[in-house]
Image: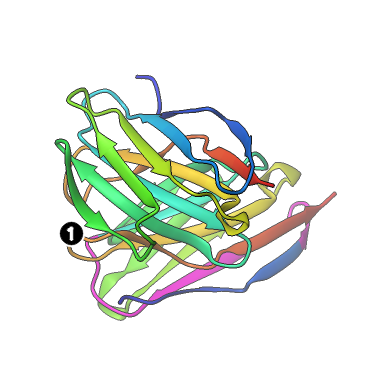
């Protein structure tokens, strides 16, 4: 089975722009979660989608949004980028509740 | 929310040594996972271990759910074991909460 894939792997943007990141889960996995990793804050949960519905949301401003498609692929969008949004964004998939989560390689976003 | 603490924060060992990494959590959990973050940032699954003991080669893990801790053992360390190790817990149906990690450095 192919693993979780994320595109793009690297991204450079400037302040004020917006960005869309994509995540394709492992085949058969219906849950996709997004995490942000920064040196100062560690790994923080952004949101989780299951069957196209947002199931949980972390403590991030409304500039961070996401969606999930019928094929379970997910996108996250960050609008009006700030310098502090520079981070590694990781996506994870799992089959359902209380199951093992598998992570993709991440997208490294740099905001200049 | 649930708290996850890892110790030690940093560990430097000679190649061939054994190590024990600890993860304490503040509440009963449905899921506990150990990850190794590779130099490119990807989290590699090591163990899915909400309770009990598992072994995979030189690595093994034990979770004592009633006492709210988990241990990751690495035997005969190799330089390729270097990196950051995270434990993460799932409480109820909520988000995976990560510890702050243990940075392991293996010296040849």
Residue at 75%, 45% in the rendered image: B79
Residue at 59%, 40% in the rendered image: A108
Question: Residue lying furthest front in this view?
Answer: A16
- The answer for which chain carries disc 1 is B
Residue at 52%, 38% in the rendered image: A106
Name the quadrant containing residue A32: top left
Instruction: Please indicate, yes or no, whether residue B76 appears anywhere in the rendered image.
Output: no
- Image coordinates of residue A18 in percent, x first then y, are 49, 40
Question: Residue lying furthest right in this view?
Answer: B108
Instruction: Please indicate, yes or no, whether residue A40 appears anywhere in the rendered image.
Output: yes
State how many labels appear: 1
Name the quadrant containing residue B10: bottom right
Applied colour scheme: rainbow
Left/right of residue B92 with respect to residue B104 in the rendered view: left
Q: Residue under circle 1? A: B93
- Image coordinates of residue A67 in percent, x first then y, are 26, 38
Residue at 32%, 75% in the rendered image: B2
Q: Nearer the viewer, residue A104 or A82?
A: A82
Whether residue A17 appears in magenta in the rendering, the answer is no
Name the quadrant containing residue A75: top left
Q: SS of the residue at dot 1?
A: loop
Left/right of residue A68 with respect to residue B82 in the rendered view: left
Q: Nearer the viewer, residue B6 or A28?
A: A28
**From what the image shows, is residue A25 above or below residue B87?**
above
* Magenta range: B13-30
């Amino acid at each position: 089975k192919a693993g979780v894939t994320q595109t793009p792997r690297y991204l450079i943007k400037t302040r004020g722009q917006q960005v869309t990141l994509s995540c394709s889960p492992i085949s058969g996995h219906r849950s996709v979660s997004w995490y942000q990793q920064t040196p100062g804050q560690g790994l923080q949960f952004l949101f989780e989608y299951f069957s196209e519905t947002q199931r949980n949301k972390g403590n991030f401003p409304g500039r961070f949004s996401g969606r999930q498609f019928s094929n379970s692929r997910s996108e996250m969008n960050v609008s009006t980028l700030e310098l502090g949004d520079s981070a590694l964004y990781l996506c994870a998939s799992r089959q359902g509740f209380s199951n093992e989560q598998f992570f993709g390689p991440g997208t490294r976003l740099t905001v200049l | 929310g649930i708290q996850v603490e890892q110790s030690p924060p940093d560990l430097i060992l000679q190649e061939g040594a054994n190590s024990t990494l600890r993860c304490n959590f503040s509440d009963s959990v449905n899921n506990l996972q150990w990850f190794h973050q590779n130099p490119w940032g990807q989290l590699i699954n090591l163990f899915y271990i909400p309770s009990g003991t598992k072994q995979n080669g030189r690595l093994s893990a034990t979770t004592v759910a009633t006492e709210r801790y988990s241990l990751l053992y690495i035997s005969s360390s190799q330089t390729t074991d270097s990196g950051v190790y995270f434990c993460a817990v799932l409480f109820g149906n909520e988000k995976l909460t990560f510890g702050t990690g243990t940075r392991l450095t293996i010296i040849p």
